[in-house]
Image (cartoon, rainbow, N blue to C red):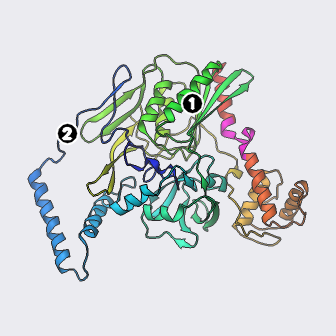
Amino acid sequence: MVVRGRTLVLSLIAVMLFSSFFTLFILEKNDYLKYQEDGSTVLPQTSSSSVKNPEKADAELNRFIEAYQKIMSTYVEQKSENELIDGAISGMVESLNDLHSSYMDAEETESFFGSLSNSFEGIGAEVTMENGRVTVVSPIKGSPSEKAGIQPRDQIINVNGESLEGLNLFEAVNKIRGPKGTNAKLEIIRPGLTDPITISVIRDAIPITTVRHETISTRDGIIGKIEITNFGESTAKEFKTALVELESKEIQGLIIDVRGNPGGYLQSVLDIGNLLIPNNGVILQIEDRNTGIQPYKSALKEPKYPIVAIIDKGSASASEILAAALQEAGNYPIVGETSYGKGTVQSPFELSDGSNLKLTIAKWLTPKGNWIHTKGVQPDIEVAQPEYYKAISFLEDVTLSLDMNNSQVSNLQLILKGLGYDPKRQDGYFDQNTEIAVKAFQKINGLPANGIVEQATAKKLQEKLIERLKDPSSDLQLQVAMETLINLIK
């Protein structure tokens, strides 16, 4: 989750980093927000020092200074002071073995923040570094990466022919990001697949609206649906506006969709929890090394209507806080797939030279004291989406025809089956049944029925797949959530 200040909150840009690049941050710089009984917030006093033994600390620092001086005076190559200090800080952060703590030197920090703008252009994927590889937490809703078929846990190892091996997250992100209209050809390792796959993503403007809402008419009355794509600074305000509008239409129940939501500001999820968690219930608890466990309670007294939430493996951090709070508040079921599993809180610290240090400073726990880190929130009703949701975009120069055998053909077969043209196999071999399915698709869509998938056919397949994915009736998780909510209304 994220703190306010010159942290990585503006990373809704480029590759949608959301701070090193998806994290839960506290909102007020370096301090937890604490709720009063009336729902207002106050800041605790900060301790003057966390160093318990100054004399021992001085001795350790002397050892560091000795090593620094020896390197400066005797190492075979001359190094600058900044190089050594930056390296030392990076080494300290790496020794934490915490993928959510990071360091950017002054030059990297200036470059990162200096390159951000209101255009929010890039591929639109939240990423982090796992086991030395850039790993996707979640593609952003409506972004180029989502449309191209990028999935949570995908590992990006190559961009436009350039390997990302050995780069830190900041350096790798600079390879991935780019202006609108440019192509990012990504080589990806996907869990469950033997060979890497290649996905082309045309960079574009990233949607910055974080809340979408609608009413759905059912046999038992009107229900509301609110989708939260991430928890930004204005998300709680957007959510409250959407909720007021839905409630003015006398909704009988509410669906909250946080699928693919990688997290964001702690304050946003707390403010939203205040509107949803009944009986002044606990929204979450924060545990740190100094103050112990601090619960955050909701300001809402009475429950209003049944609520069902939808999560998936791309729901992380603040999304998991909201889902767990609803789940443990009572009869508010969770539908979907086990979430990402991030149960820590970070705070950024701007150092005197303009460099930026982001550290994990606390754990967050569910209302019942559970720590979901690396485990995720388990849904009450587990539902996976249809297989064609895993399809990826075709390469720009694609040509697929009879007797070819590769992952692109397997992807073609997945799309054909999802669109109702079953090729009878999905193993990547382009046989006669696959050719027949391609010809049938081409004929119905006004294309030359030659059974060959080239650019025109690939483009039309992609368009039709996107139409299918946008059709609520094909969204099994949503359909189950609706049915679950209707049963609660009765």
Q: Decide if residue 59 is on the left or right side of residue 97.
A: left
Local packing at callout 2 (Cα closer than 10 Å; few below 14, some 14-19, many 20+) is: few
Question: Residue 237 appears at what percent x and percent y?
Answer: 50, 31
User: Where is residue 63, by image quadrant?
Assistant: bottom left
Measuring 66% from the left and 56% from the top, which residue is drawn there? Answer: 148
Question: Residue 13 appears at what percent x and percent y?
Answer: 52, 52
Nearer to us in this view, 352 or 212: 352
Question: Residue 466 appears at what percent x and percent y?
Answer: 73, 50
Nearer to us in this view, 268 or 237: 237
Measuring 29% from the left and 66% from the top, which residue is drawn there? Answer: 87
Q: Decide if residue 123 is on the left or right side of residue 27.
A: right
What's the magenta region?
469-478
Question: Residue 232 appears at what percent x and percent y?
Answer: 48, 40
Task: Please identify the dominant SS of the magenta region.
Answer: helix
The numbered dot on residue 47 is 2
Residue 247, magenta (yes or no): no
The numbered dot on residue 333 is 1
The numbered dot on residue 12 is none
Measuring 90% from the left and 54% from the top, which residue is drawn there? Answer: 444
192 lies above or below 78: above
Q: CA distance from mark 1 to mark 2?
A: 41 Å
User: Where is residue 45, by image quadrant?
Assistant: top left
